[in-house]
Image (spheres, rainbow, N blue to C red):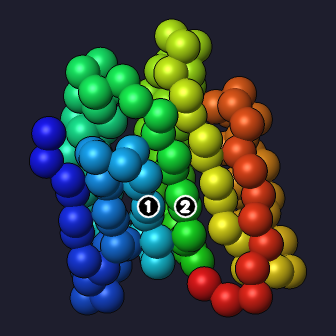
Amino acid sequence: MENIVLEANMEQFTPFVYFNSRTGVCEISGESYLEKTYAFYDPLYVWLNEYTTTVRKPLTMNFKLRYMNTSSSKCILMMLKILKDYQQQGGQVAVNWYIKKEDEVMLEEVEDLKEEAEMQINLIQVDAL
């Protein structure tokens, strides 16, 4: 299984993505407010589905987003649901969300995602992202 590495593109407003199939550590960071959101996130769903059905090792998802639009939030929710399904099938999953201290908007968005996905998301406050 291949890793996914996508560099952030500020012209297209895409985040940095690194999904490591060997370690199971995945990261999405930066800003996500691109036009073709579903086309961007679709390969990530495919990767997660393959990892959770064939590799079946522990998986850690780290989100370090400074900003995301509504369509990105919906795509991330779909990713969280894949992780929740894997967890319910006995897979080990940890979801960490790094939030800049005092970023009430992102905190509220993450709390909404946590509630909708019905899964544990570890909130980690940091000075800068």
Using the image, determine if residue 103 lies above or below residue 46.
Answer: below
60 left or right of 104 in image: left
**Secondary structure under the numbered disc 1 in the rendered image:** strand
Image location (x, y in percent) of residue 68: 52, 67
Q: Residues within 10 Å of mark 1 (few under 14, many from 20)?
A: some
Q: Residues within 10 Å of mark 2 (few under 14, many from 20)?
A: many
**Residue at 46% of width from left, 71% of height from top?**
29
Image location (x, y in percent) of residue 78: 45, 36
Observer-nearest residue: 56 or 18? 56
Observer-nearest residue: 24 or 106? 24
Amino acid type of the residue that numbered disc 1 sits on in the rendered structure:
Glu
Can residue 105 be seen? no
**Residue at 13% of width from left, 47% of height from top?**
2
Instruction: Name the image quarter holding residue 84.
Output: top right
Can residue 43 be seen? yes
Observer-nearest residue: 55 or 9? 55
**Residue behind mark 2:** 63
| Quarter placement of the N terminus | top left
| Quarter placement of the C terminus | bottom right
Image location (x, y in percent) of residue 125: 79, 72
**Residue behind mark 1:** 27
Using the image, determine if residue 12 lies above or below residue 37.
Answer: below
Numbered marks: total:
2
